[in-house]
Amino acid sequence: MKTITTALSAATFALSLTSTQVIADMQTETVEYTVNGDTFTGYIAWDDDVEAKRPGVLVVHEWWGHNEFARGQAEKLAKAGYTAFALDMYGSGKVADHPDDAKQFMQEATSDIDNIKSRFMAAMELLQNHDSVDGDRIAAQGYCFGGAVVLNMARLGVDLDGVVSYHGALGSSIKAEAGKVNARVQVYTGGADQMVPSDQVADLVREMQDAEVDLTLVSFPGVLHSFTNPEADRIGKEFGMPVGYDNAAAKRSWDGTLRFYNEIFAE
């Protein structure tokens, strides 16, 4: 097994390729890597039939952890012509089936913003160094918890071309500052999302406007939290949570994301 070790300013990580699969022309790899002594499991997908280097997109999971939904989003991006890395923010094996566990994992991860940034930057460097990727063209998209993560990375000035938040929390103790945010920002939220109320939406628009950030925000009327995840209806019924899948919103947000990437990576 080949191991690659790279030094980072905020973290060190070792990468091991644990398995490789071929789906038509799409290649996928499950990888284990370490950040500050902790082990994480990620998933890379790309189209091996394309010879040219292409942009890379980081995929940050929901509060459930690095699961099949996150991997599926990476595969969709690979089919669209990108190399995608579904990263892991919690640590290997920390995937929740119950909201209580998801809440605990999320609180542990978000207790230290430096830890969050270190984990994100390690994954970003791993993606940038992939043979198929143009390391100067990187974006990130996140869902729920992951949506908040990518917004905070933009606020912190991480060198990303763009970030996309799907039904992510919009409020943060970190605030965007004029001249600091490098990424263009796109946000998709549900108009009936009880976890992301309208005051959060208004505050984000004001924050980004004051910081002179290029923001596109789409609010889908009557749409609940987790609208991109087909499992949301089952989860809502099982745990009594105000979440629900919406096929139209999921499709519109995905199509809008691909148009967004076409724009930012063509610049």
Image: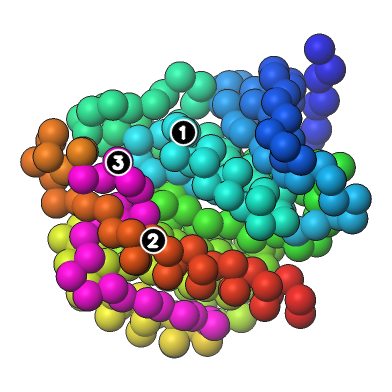
- Above or below for 224 versus 118: below
Residue type at mark 2: give it. Answer: Ala
Query: Which residue occupies 80% across, 57% down?
Result: 54
Residue on which disc 2 sits: 250
Q: Which class describes the residues within 10 Å of circle 2: few (<14), some (14-19), or many (20+)?
A: some
Q: Position of residue 261 (x, y in %)?
A: 64, 69
For the residues labelled 3 and 2, say whether their Cβ atoms are less than 8 Å apart: no
Residue on which disc 3 sits: 231
Q: Position of residue 141 (x, y in %)?
A: 53, 57
Q: Is residue 148 visible to the viewer in this orientation of the structure? A: no
C-alpha separation, residue under disc 3 versus residue under disc 1: 11 Å
- Above or below for 76 versus 100: below
Does the magenta-highlighted stretch encompass residue 13? no
- Above or below for 173 versus 6: below
Q: How is the image coloured?
A: rainbow
Q: Which residues are magenta?
A: 213-233
Closer to the N terminus: mark 3 or mark 2? 3
Q: Position of residue 208 (x, y in %)?
A: 44, 80
Residue on which disc 1 sits: 68
Q: Position of residue 260 (x, y in %)?
A: 59, 73
Seen in the image, is 85 located left or right of residue 242? right
Does the magenta-highlighted stretch encompass residue 220? yes
Query: Which residue occupies 26% across, 45% down?
Result: 232
Query: Callout 3: helix, strand or loop?
Result: loop
Residue type at mark 3: give it. Answer: Glu
Query: Which residue occupies 80% across, 26% down?
Result: 5
Picture quadrant where residue 63 is located: top left
Pick the quarter of the image with the N terminus: top right
Q: Is residue 184 visible to the viewer in this orientation of the structure? A: yes
Residue type at mark 1: give it. Answer: Glu
Seen in the image, is 236 located left or right of residue 94? left
